[in-house]
Image (spheres, grey):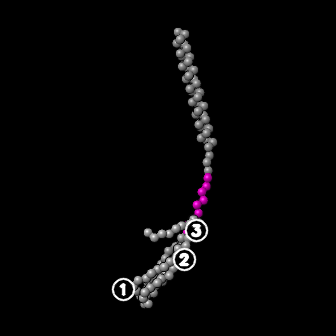
Amino acid sequence: MNNTIRIIYNTGLVFFALIVSLGIVGYSAAAWNTDLHSSGSIMTGNIDPVFTDVYAVTDYDRSTVDVDIWSNGGKSMFITINDACPDTQVEIKYTITNRGSVPIKFSRA
């Protein structure tokens, strides 16, 4: 009988130690999660590609070509060809400039 009481006492002691240990671990994890803060900010800049220098080259004297880039702040190009004959070819030459703070590179596809 003395042996049975010792086993019950040891089991109870282990159970009590386990409950106390898990309580301490749970409290520590909760305190760690509530006190952990992280913050930051990122500044990336912007890109602003625009057409800056545009002109048209034609092979025929009869056709007139008008290229407008200023009506939209250089964001788009409007091309008007008047009095075009069959097989009229027009070459549009342009320059793109980046007015933003992030460098960009243009390449032909």
Q: Secondary structure at mark 1?
A: loop
Q: Position of residue 87 (x, y in %)?
A: 37, 84
Dot label at residue 86: 1
Q: Position of residue 51 (x, y in %)?
A: 52, 75
Few, some or many C-alpha atoms within 10 Å of disc 3 (few <14, some 14-19, many ≥20)?
A: few
Q: Residue at x 42, y 88 (%)?
A: 60
In the picture, measured across the screen, residue 34 lies left or right of residue 88, that is right
Circle 3 sits on which residue? 100
Which residue is at the front of the view, 58 or 76? 58
Q: How many marks?
A: 3
Q: Is 78 drawn above or below residue 10 in the view shown? A: below
Q: Of the residues under marks 2 and 3, which one precedes in the sequence?
A: 2
Q: Residue at x 58, y 24 (%)?
A: 17
Q: In the rendered view of the protein, which quadrant contains the C terminus?
A: bottom left
**Real-space Cα distance between discs 1 and 3?**
41 Å
Q: Which residue type carries mark 2? A: Thr
Circle 2 sits on which residue? 52
Q: Magenta segment range?
A: 40-48
Q: Position of residue 104 (x, y in %)?
A: 54, 67
Residue 42 magenta-highlighted:
yes
Q: Of the residues under marks 1 and 3, which one precedes in the sequence?
A: 1
Q: Is 97 drawn above or below residue 35 in the view shown? A: below
Residue 72 seen by the camera: no
Q: Secondary structure at mark 3?
A: loop
